[in-house]
Amino acid sequence: MKKVRTVILAFISTVSMVSGQQDPVISHYMFNTQTYNPAYSGMSGMIAATAITRQQWVGFPGAPSTMIFNINTPFNIFGLTSGAGLLIESDKYGFSNDINITLAYSYLMPLGTGTLGAGLSAGILNKTLEPEWFIPGGSAHTPPSGDPLIPENDESYLALDIAGGVYYQGINYYVGLSITHLNQPDIKYTETATYVSRQYYLTAGYTFQLPNPALELIPSAFVVFDGAAVQYVATGMVRYNKKVWGGVSYRAGDAISGFAGTELYNGLKIGYGYDFPLSEIRKGTSGSHEFIVSYSFDIGLGKSTTKYKSIRFL
């Protein structure tokens, strides 16, 4: 098992250098729209802040560890209803440590019974490599210096990162389309060069009122495509009195996730999620854990009356 873990750790790090990077996997995607779609900025009509921490594949050396903080707010400029957002994201996996800091702007306009947002974001992506290799002795094993694709020393590179998207919020449904890493940032290390591939996101959800007026059924879907592979996530969530929720997600071929949360006090919400892996990697891990904390409050900028029926977390 130790040998398998070492091989996978090396694979995670090397693939990220050679073929680009996939954005972090977050089970609470329906509560984290700001991270992958700048058009969501200001959509809730409130100042909304969210923090997420995720430890993937607990017990597996070099497994991904992600921390996310984002905040967004509506505002008016030159008579335009707008939104602004800030994202700070740290993602560690294998030998890599990525930090992404971006600012977002969205233009919000009424459309039908809802609101349409169109947004862009730009920021800095800092990719760092901190290799720590253990190479057994003997002529059968190649030292790092014998392969130009294997880094020996710490490396760091800064690049401009751009994203864009559109998002529509109706009375009881939403749909969004976005692209991260629009400019496919080039990452140039001393011995190798790579790039961060575009990630295409499609997300949608709907709220069904159940016979009990305090209960809502909220199915949603999340699709991400990186140019080579597609990942599908389907989720069913039940919400009670708009303050307590729980649900299950299926990430095709990867994991089954369960999550639950509650509003503690006037806009302060907490949640927890657990992923049970379905792939062979489950033999080396006890699963993945994810925590979310958010806080939102109204700043009196003319909140839409449809917001109270929103299926969004924030």
Image (cartoon, rainbow, N blue to C red):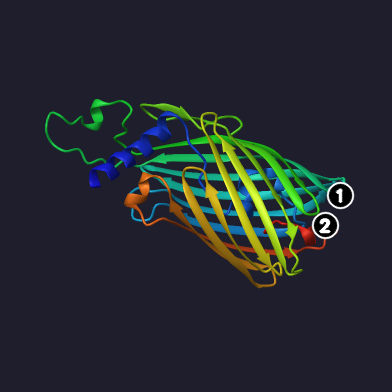
Given residues 240 and 168, the one toward you in this image is 240
Q: How many marks?
A: 2
Residue 190: % across, % down: 37, 28
Q: Residue at x 31, y 37 (%)?
A: 153
Q: Residue at x 61, y 32 (%)?
A: 182
Drawn side of residue 257 relative to residue 59, left or right? right
Q: Earlier in the sequence, mark 1 or mark 2?
A: 1
Drawn side of residue 157 relative to residue 206, left or right? left
Residue 222: % across, % down: 61, 44
Q: On the image, numbered disc 2 is attached to which residue? A: 306
> Which amino acid, mark 1?
Thr
> Which amino acid, mark 2?
Thr
Asked which secondary structure carries label 1, the reply is: loop
In the figure, 59 relative to 186: above or below? below
Say if mark 1 contacts mark 2, CB within 8 Å.
Answer: yes
Asked which secondary structure carries label 2, the reply is: helix
Q: Residues within 10 Å of mark 2 (few under 14, many from 20)?
A: some
Q: On the image, numbered disc 1 is attached to which residue? A: 113
Q: Residues within 10 Å of mark 1 (few under 14, many from 20)?
A: few
